[in-house]
Image: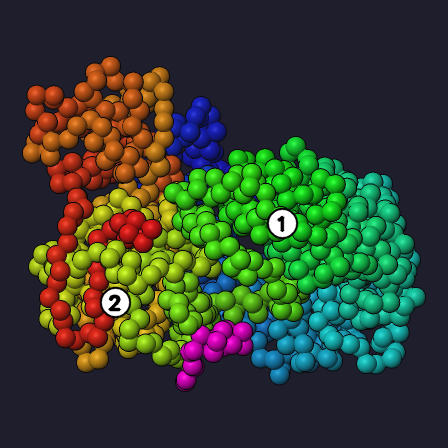
Amino acid sequence: MALTGMRGLSVFISDVRNCQNKEQERLRVDKELGNIRTRFKNEKALTHYKKKKYVWKMLYIYMLGYDVDFGHMEAVSLISAPKYPEKQVGYIVTSCLLTENHEFLRMVINTVRNDIIGRNETFQCLALTMVGNIGGKEFSESLATDVQKLLVSSSCRPLVRKKAALCLLRLYRKNPDVVNIDGWSDRMSQLLDERDLGVLTSVMSLFVALVSNNVEAYWNCLPKCVKILERLGRNQDVPQEYTYHGIPSPWIQVKTMRALQYFPTIEDPNTKRALFEVLQRILMGTDVVKNVNKNNAAHAILFEALALVVHLDAEKEMMSQCVALLGKFVAVREPNIRYLGLENMTRMLLVSDVQDIIKSHQAQIIISLKDPDISIRRRALDLLYGMCDVTNAKDIVEELLQYLNTADFAMREELALKAAILAEKFAPDLSWYVDVILQLIDKAGDFVSDDIWYRVVQFVTNNEDLQPYAATKAREYLEKPVLHETMVKVSAYLLGEYNHLLARRTGCTPKEIFIIINEKLPTVTTSTVAIVLSTYAKILMHNHPPDPELQEQIWSIFRKYESYIDVEIQQRAVEYIALCNKGAALVDVLAEMPKFPERQSALLKKAEVAEVDTAEQSAIRIRSQQQTSNALVVTDQRPTEGSLPVSQLGVVRMPSGKMEASTQDQTSFQDQGMTKENGVITEVVPQDVPPADLLGDLLGPLAINGSPATAVPVEQRNQNLLSVVEATPEAAGSLALTTVDNQPNSIQPIVNIAERFNELCLKDSGVLYEDLHIQIGIKAEWQAHHGHIVLFLGNKNTSPLVSVQALILPPTHLKMELSLVPETVPPRAQVQCPLEFVNLRASRDVAVLDFSYKFGTAMVYVKLRLPAVINKFLQPISVTAEEFFAQWKSLSGPPLKLQEVLRGVKPLSLPEMANLFTSLHLAVNPGIDTNPNNLIACTTFYSESTRATLCLIRVETDPSDRTQLRITIASGDPTLTFELKESIKEYLVNIPTQTSSAVVAPSQPQSPVTPVAYNDPGAMLAGLL
């Protein structure tokens, strides 16, 4: 591309290159853009030369990374120019600046078509290149036929046909309907006879795309592909320019063998024999040489040939030859070749006849497990995992355990999981399996999932002969001075269940076991403390004859945890003390765990998922996930005799908005007294059952499968329920709650909607809305400029809520996506609807949830503000005085630094104001301001446009008049400065407060369930505890 004679363009490029910093470059670019814009306004005085020059400048500015939002019409208009220089500029700049959906492209379709069907080959190449780069549906529909004619035309030069093939490939990828399969089968067969290798290379790319979508239509092309490989393999009629380091056109060979892999088999014996001869020649003629480029080309062909050999399930002799060649590659020094050798040997494991041959390379594969390159180590681990069976399981697992000591942290979790799976699948005896798992926990406890030690407990419980051995090994590990917490868990559990089997062994009396476990108690977390308490209770049960000293020591520990903050540990301690006072009843209650029912291992399930990982099945899984709703329907469990319902909720996936359950889920529903009719889960609920704890999920973690909640007596539950708040939509405020089309609701909210919204602006979980029939709760997580909210829709009645609809009305500064909301909420059930946020920029506008449902004949419409406010995207940060003042001085004056005197502020002491700032995610930094009556706070604001922006806040108070203060806010974004100042101002002038009391609302005859409102989830939790 010659740019000679364009002095202005050369000067501009020189100026940009001579800029000392980014700011100078930006100023020079802005100046030039202003000049170009001015020139384009006076189009009459603009010659083709000047227009071409300014369009080149626009392209250069675009290449520098700046936005060019004007001049597109001038670039497009150059395509219609009659001369080559202007037309070339038009095509190139249009290809770079415009996308396939740009409206200006419609204006040039006729011009492009005329260039394609014209006789000027240069114009044809320019047009085909632009269409191939941009693609698009409109180009496909308008130009595909003309491009096909060029491709099959015998009068066109190879240069044009090459570009036509690549252009048609792009159009086919964007719109597969443009190629008529019936007519193209014969055309493609003729094109594969092409002698020009340049055209054949482009045609083969198109052929690969065609057979990947419909292989059945192109069986007549299969012999032609084999002939191409024969021609290239024998180096027949291959021009020198298509020979790469002595290898005839490696690109065509690779693409041809890739196309052959789409055909399931080769039925013609002559064609099959000819192909295997070519493959045999490739396998025999490929070796490692010093020339890197030749290595790359030769090995690209070789590894594609290996994949084709595996696909065609060749004879065992050829398979053995492939494995031997790969074993040779695994041993070379070049890391790229070694990686490919390991990867392809893993693929060869799919062939059953060669697994024994691969085992002969086990020593070299183990050496690769210690390679400095982590990618090679991962491939070696995958290969060892795949080639393991009963004959070599011990050797491989021992190597993995030994390697675990020095493995990277990035690999340890995968390594531990695979070692555990291999130990379970191929264990010669169960005692070896127990040894392996305990070693695994000891060496890499942080990377051992709970599924692994759960599984070893199941094995030990179901095999009586294994119990003494497992308890002895657990006792040995407890003697170590430093022990991972997972080892403490499994050892405490095993010794609690089976310590009586070791009673006659030295050092294994109940008191000695208690002492060695109790040494670990101060170092473990609450989840392990719960297991240890159960172990102590079991030790007491097996303590015969009773040891008063041991009994008093254990009772004192139980009494210590009676008032522990964790409800699970507190409950266990209280119950164990009560059981100890019952004497003989303790033996019946704390009897040995029964055998677990036979079930498929969770680890083996993971292994099956990992083994089935082809691209096609991955796509199937992705499509099924896209068709499955993210909403989760949760139903109460039916109470057993003499017990009360708990809030542990079963989960059911809802594909396409309809509720379906697996066989396992159906069984659990039948066990719980539920039936399934017409795809909807129903449940018979006794009328005397108290309302479900719809806040259970709000107070717990966001994980769907949580631990079961503790059953609470009816009397205590009724005493702890908070009273109902009497409220009306008017009291809630028009912004918090409005109705659609001013339709009056017969069902009124029983909470103050505005207060609920204000509370949720300062915390991440709670109730957003509640009436007689439904409770809408929120639990949120915020990270940088991303937010994740789960809406909990709880049906409080024994009848379903129907016609449920939820629509998000987002402000312009938020990108939001709500998962599918089911149209029906089952009786006494809860639906979870995830909602994703992305913050684009600073703003105080709020999103609105437009929600409606129908109960009986009453239709309820509400609009609720969602607490995705500006302070949710703040991250508090502490800075030193030097850092603060350096930033403070650099941000001088409006609009980056704003100051305002606030009057009518609610009187707050400095500690109270500091607490308010903390709840707003502002980090108060004491000691920076020398005036003790002032506050300094810092935070970081995250958005997609600005990423992380530091914000500085200074509040100056008057000790004599707390109703006024002066606030100064500074940041690098003027919009953020203003919005954050106004947001903090709203909290200082009108601080949201929680209601301290509740009033009982009059009973409503419309609902059979007594309505209950919870003012504060924390208060509700405190009541339940």
In the image, residue 23 sits, relative to residue 305, either above or below, namely above
Which mark sits nearer the N-terminus, 2 or 1?
A: 1
| Residue type at the position of mark 2 | Ile
Left or right: residue 10 compared with residue 170 = left
Q: Is residue 969 magenta?
A: no
The image shows residue 57, relative to residue 655, as above or below, that is: above
Callout 1 secondary element: loop
Image quadrant where one finds the N terminus: top right
Number of the label disc, if any, that sits on residue 319: none
Pick the residue in front: 180 or 926: 926
Residue 412 lies in quadrant: top right
Q: Position of residue 153 (x, y in %)?
A: 64, 73
Question: Dot 2 corresponds to which residue?
Answer: 774
Q: Amino acid at mark 1?
A: His
Pair 2/1: label in front: 1
Q: CA distance from mark 2 to mark 1?
A: 56 Å
Image check: 890 left or right of 386? Answer: left
Residue bearing mark 1: 544
User: SS for tag 2?
Assistant: strand
Magenta-drawn stretch contains 670: yes
Residue at the image position 28 percent from the left and 41 percent from the top: 871
Nearest the viewer among 567 and 651 is 567
Q: Which residues are magenta?
A: 663-678
Q: Residue at 46% across / 52% down in the picture?
A: 581
Q: Residue at x 69, y 43 (%)?
A: 508
Please tell me how crowded label 2 is: few (under 14), some (14-19), or many (20+) other residues with Cα within 10 Å: many
